[in-house]
Amino acid sequence: MRDTDKFIKNIDIAIVNNSINFLSTRKDYKKALKSFYEVLRPGGALIILTPNKLYYKEAFTQLIGVQFMPKFLANWYVKFRKRRETYEDIRLPSPFELKRWLKKTGFKEIKVIDAYTLLDKNWKRYFKPRFYLVAIK
């Protein structure tokens, strides 16, 4: 075992900032979350900041509801509205999806935190434009 292998398997905290939404399939999401889980030490934390699928305006196009459309329709719509060339490379997660996937990966303590007030109370945090998700291994 190389010294770098010990470091890679013993990380205290991993921060993912506005990039996980570019994984375009559920399989890619699950693979990435498993990789984060493997490199964190026991008790290590994963912090994800990401746009919220449940917010009425989509984060990258600012179009209302495009994140709920089938991909073929979303592609046509964002191109028609001249916001992006394609919508194929975007998949916004909801807080509920990410929480479920993290539990299946093995994370124990998972909290959804309002990105604006930094509180984990109040149901409104699930519908803000962005959210933090903190998961402890």
Image: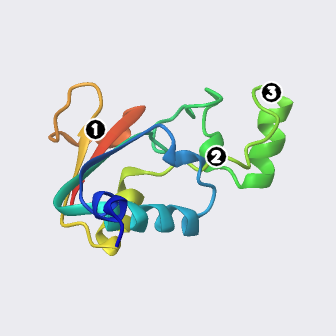
- Kindly indicate the quadrant of the structure image that contains residue 135: bottom left
The amino acid sitting under disc 3 is Arg
Q: Secondary structure at mark 2?
A: loop
Q: Circle 3 sits on which residue?
A: 81
Q: Circle 2 sits on which residue?
A: 90
Check disc 1: other Cα within 10 Å, few if <14, some if 14-19, many if 20+: many
Q: Position of residue 15 (x, y in %)?
A: 34, 42
Q: Is residue 74 above or below residue 135?
A: above
Q: Position of residue 116 (x, y in %)?
A: 28, 25
The amino acid sitting under disc 1 is Arg
State the residue lying farthest toward the front: 2
- Kindly indicate the quadrant of the structure image that contains residue 98: bottom left
Cα gap from disc 2 to disc 1, whole angstroms: 22 Å
Q: Circle 1 sits on which residue?
A: 125
Which tag is nearer the camera, tag 2 or tag 3? 2
Residue at 51%, 42% in the rendered image: 19
Residue at 80%, 27% in the rendered image: 81
Q: Is residue 44 above or below residue 80?
A: below
Tell me if residue 137 can be seen.
Answer: no
In this view, the residue in front, 37 or 4, is 4
Residue 89 shown left or right of residue 52 in the figure: right
